[in-house]
Image: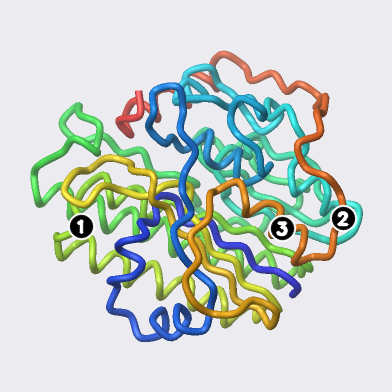
Amino acid sequence: MKLLWIGLDGLSFRMALKANHAWWRRLLQSSRHGISQSVLTGEEVPYTGPNWASLYTGVQPEVHGITDAGWLLEGLKYQDIRVNTIFDLIDPLFSQALMTLPLTYPAFPVSGWMVSGFPTPKSLRDCFYPEEVGNLLPDGFVIDHAKCARGMGWDRIEDEAVKLKLKKTFSGVARSHVATFKRIFAEWPVEAAFVGLTYVDRINHLFVQKDASLLAAYSEIFDLVEELVDFCRPETLLICSDHGFAEEKREHDLYGFYLIRDSRSPGGRKDIVITELAPAVLRILGIEGELGIPVDRPKVKIKPGKMQEIKQRLKALGYI
């Protein structure tokens, strides 16, 4: 595999450096890494949708069109990103897989396969390409867990027992995604794979950085990253996040994280902004195409009932 790109929603720079995980510590020492500063929205806070779109396009929100948290309420989709993405430029040249990346619903044709990410409906309809991929999804497969407790969004829950129960569920979702990626990849190997995991974000909405449960969750996610890397054995590994989390609060901050390991990248720390990562992907793959080019994507209409289902799940998650 030429490139394995792992996107960890909400991976905090501070937590990435303090994690007590032997494999992860060795990876940090041998890789270029640092802060990936998130883009600001009009409300001057980083949001999931705008940042993932910037990861895919290398441009600011006012250019790609996903500008604030309203993308969830408005039902904005990958097809609403109004400039070209790394996936557009990769597709004619390399086979690729997209696995549970945020803002990739509904699924679209790629030269390989894909499973859409958050915020997909529970039905999983329109969530994978090609159709045969659906046959490889395990029974009970979910893309994002939106369980609501006591009528509250889970990010506002204070009951420790409830939070620990949710942690176990979120952990199971992440493990399922990694196992499912490996299962599909065994049938359809590709040259570039893009995998998104939301466990870190979900757990940061339940605990603060001093909590033992959050530290344990980071160890779990680094176990899964190690499993993916050992399975794929990529020539280049790129790990990144869309934003970070405040140290003492359960809320987003600007200090996301990135890491690049390949034979051409020296180790050590170098802080960047999030828009630098898409061009880095093109350089890694030797693609000379230009990012930020306006595109007119085929519009995909989501039936009202399906959008209502998505909104109900977002409400349970505490996003709306």
Residue 218 versus residue 317 in the image, above or below: below
Distance of label 2 from label 1 (alpha carbons) = 41 Å
In front here: 33 or 203? 33
Q: Is residue 238 visible?
A: yes
Q: Position of residue 65 (x, y in %)?
A: 63, 24
Looking at the image, which residue is at 76% across and 52% down? 132
Front label number (2 vs 1):
2
Asked if labels 1 and 2 touch by Cβ distance under 8 angstroms, the answer is no
Amino acid at dot 1:
Gln
* Mark 1 lies on residue: 209
Q: Earlier in the sequence, mark 3 or mark 2?
A: 3
Q: Is 10 positioned to the left or the right of 203 in the image?
A: right
Asked if labels 2 and 3 touch by Cβ distance under 8 angstroms, the answer is no
Mark 2 packing: few (<14 Cα in 10 Å), some, or many (20+)?
Answer: few
Element class at badge 3: strand
Q: Is 175 positioned to the left or the right of 220 in the image?
A: right
Q: Earlier in the sequence, mark 1 or mark 3?
A: 3
Residue 261 versus residue 121 in the image, above or below: below
Q: Is 59 positioned to the left or the right of 210 in the image?
A: right
Q: Position of residue 24 (x, y in %)?
A: 41, 79
* Mark 2 lies on residue: 288
Q: Position of residue 239 (x, y in %)?
A: 54, 64
Q: Earlier in the sequence, mark 2 or mark 1?
A: 1
Looking at the image, which residue is at 50% across and 66% down? 270
Q: Position of residue 171 (x, y in %)?
A: 34, 60
